[in-house]
Amino acid sequence: MNPTLEIFSQGEEVVTGQAVDTNAAWLSEQVVALGFTVTRHTAVGDKLDDLIALLREIATRADCCICTGGLGPTSDDLTAEAVAKAFGLPLEVDPVALAQIQHYFSLRNRQMADANRKQALLPKTAERIDNAWGTAPGFSLQVGRCWFAFVPGVPSEMRHLYLETIRPRLSSRFVLRPGKLVTLKTIGIGESAIQQLINTCDIPEDVQLGFRASPDDVQTKLLFSAAYPQTALTALVDTIAAKLGDYVYAIDGLGQASGDLVCTINQLMTEGKHTLAVVETASQGLLAAKCIGLEWLLETHYQQALERLGQKLNVTLDSNDLSASARAVATAIRRDSAADFVLVQLAAGDNKIFHAKDQAILLYNVLLTEDGFYQTTHSVAGPISTKQNQAALLALDLLRRYLQHKEL
Amino acid sequence: MNPTLEIFSQGEEVVTGQAVDTNAAWLSEQVVALGFTVTRHTAVGDKLDDLIALLREIATRADCCICTGGLGPTSDDLTAEAVAKAFGLPLEVDPVALAQIQHYFSLRNRQMADANRKQALLPKTAERIDNAWGTAPGFSLQVGRCWFAFVPGVPSEMRHLYLETIRPRLSSRFVLRPGKLVTLKTIGIGESAIQQLINTCDIPEDVQLGFRASPDDVQTKLLFSAAYPQTALTALVDTIAAKLGDYVYAIDGLGQASGDLVCTINQLMTEGKHTLAVVETASQGLLAAKCIGLEWLLETHYQQALERLGQKLNVTLDSNDLSASARAVATAIRRDSAADFVLVQLAAGDNKIFHAKDQAILLYNVLLTEDGFYQTTHSVAGPISTKQNQAALLALDLLRRYLQHKEL
């Protein structure tokens, strides 16, 4: 039997629906992979009595509980106080936490408000969870059968603290028999098309098949029992990967984690010592933004009007032949750039079509490398933010396909 | 006192984290606006005993409960059975529901599976909620103090059923007095600093004060009771807005909703018929990406190396005086651009500092308009994604401050 775990989210913004609780799903996925059975998610607002009642309930019901939110400096952040009252553990100043909070503010040349002092108060017996990503430290403690971990609700901080501190503590405190999760990550193909391709594969009953579609990719997940033989596992993954072909940009769970599409590209660009210049249109900066801090991206350009882009580069561009125009732009940029690759994205469809969620734009991506031109064309519909994101991903995916396969 | 309401989500995909529960947030926002106080969200998996226990808990605790999920045809859809067992209300075939399910299949020329017959079983005393958007009808019933409504978990079906059936039933069954919510949205100031500024304001006890910090802004929320006089409301909001000064970029809840920082800027840029060219460094495309589809953003540039940016623009840039360099870049861009405003962001700190979450970069933002130069300097620390986002927001906020105040 797996140990049971509950997720508890605190915050008025969650119960009033001002914020969608993505923390609960993210944490659940993590701990299920680790070997826990998640039995419940609960969210309550900033009411001390509700918090106290819920903490006491969970302490008698679950083996473990991860709590997010309510650790901020303001008067509606009540988690530490609720823990103190629920379990009779008075709050005490943690001097290390206080020093960390003071350091956080001095680093930013800002005065620490008195309110922030509160964040250094931890319930007696609690073990601090250091937070290098924000002001509020987390903490963990054992009450009755249940081991609790409390972390801030800001998703980026929460994720860091889980991975850096909570996960190691869980692994050392619980006897866990995690299954083996293999995830095939694809771009440019939908969930139902994947399912149709896989249908002919013979998937044994003790392998759990799942799909997860996000704005950035579609993930096909295979969960194997802990006892599943490694050779059979590899064989099944190979068969499915072959069915999905070069839509697969990475496979997680066979060795080291691979990260997202940009991580895959970053590794290949760094290994090959390549550099890149980019012209964006429909993604309007988002392609560059996804590559934040990566040294091989030397320069990017965005021009709203195609005509003006041509004027600046001193080439004539034909809006009726965007394929040829994209090649002309790439050639002109390369002449004047230190980068050895140039990626150009042009889009057909005026601003009205771009804004209309039921109309599609046509995307022309061209990649110029030492091996010549590579190009793809895609039709993308949906709300403008979807079009923008798909435009960034599909242009990057052209680069990924070139780097992985050199043929498209 | 508002009646209390709980949201209850059923489904293994929710507790295992395969699906983010967006239903809970959507429903909460709806019922809060209607005049309920949402006290709890709970999600459990497909386990009959857990469902029964939870239903009994809620029946003693809340005035109302909306439940999503678990009404499908398969063996893991247990909600109706759990309701029957929890409250001793035997399941009975609802002939109208059965006819509707049969009609659903005959309309699509498909054979009704035996499993679907189960979906016509409702607990005794339950009132059917017709579902024209799927096969499973919902139902509602009163148990003790609590009125329950059960609907399918598919978001589109759930939303239809809420709006068409549940909301009217709520309005007729409960005496509701919706409150008035005013939100002050700020950028460039932290939650605790806001609280310190507001501390001296006299906030009456029947006004609920809350804060919400997101990566994009900090929101100060004032929830007034329905009976709160409008003139007193306006006076209090004015007082608080004056304390927060020009950190406030928008106030929601006094008239029409204002949207985020980019919406505020978009309105002012469009009204003033201005256009903009941008040079980004630390935000690396994210500033442009946030302005997706807005016609006043004519062009943007990103160059990794300051030296190369100077070469391209034919100006000499001094990395020891980024303020002057940013002004020189803005002047050069304006000479060659159709835009009347130029926004230039330069950052001090090498790539290593940029990646180090505990080290700060210095941001120099310069805005060149017909009125001359405006500029700000900020120190930003944190993970690289935080630095990127703050860099985009702080540059945009310089533009917002100019547009709203013409002085900085």
Image (cartoon, coloured by chain):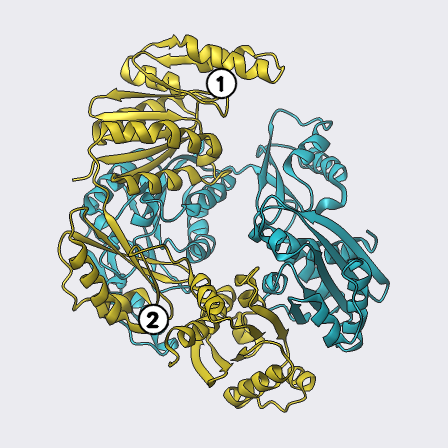
Chain colours: A cyan, B yellow
In the picture shown, does residue B360 fall above or below B36? below
Q: Quadrant of residue A398?
A: bottom right
In the picture shown, does residue B51 fall above or below B179? above
Q: What label sits on residue B364 in the rendered view?
A: none
Category of crowding for the residue at label 1, using alpha-carbon neighbours closer than 10 angstroms: few (below 14), some (14–19), many (at least 20): few
Looking at this view, name the residue that lies furthest to the right. A371
Q: In the rendering, at what x and y percent does residue B276 appear?
A: 55, 73
Residue linked to disc 2: B247
Q: Kindly identify which chain the residue marked by label 2 belongs to.
A: B
In the picture shown, does residue B336 fall above or below A340? below
Q: Kindly identify which chain the residue marked by label 1 belongs to.
A: B
Residue linked to disc 1: B75
Q: Residue at x 37, y 71 (%)?
A: B188
Rendered-image quadrant of the C terminus of chain B: bottom left
Pick the residue in front: A274 or B406: B406
Q: Quadrant of residue A365?
A: bottom right
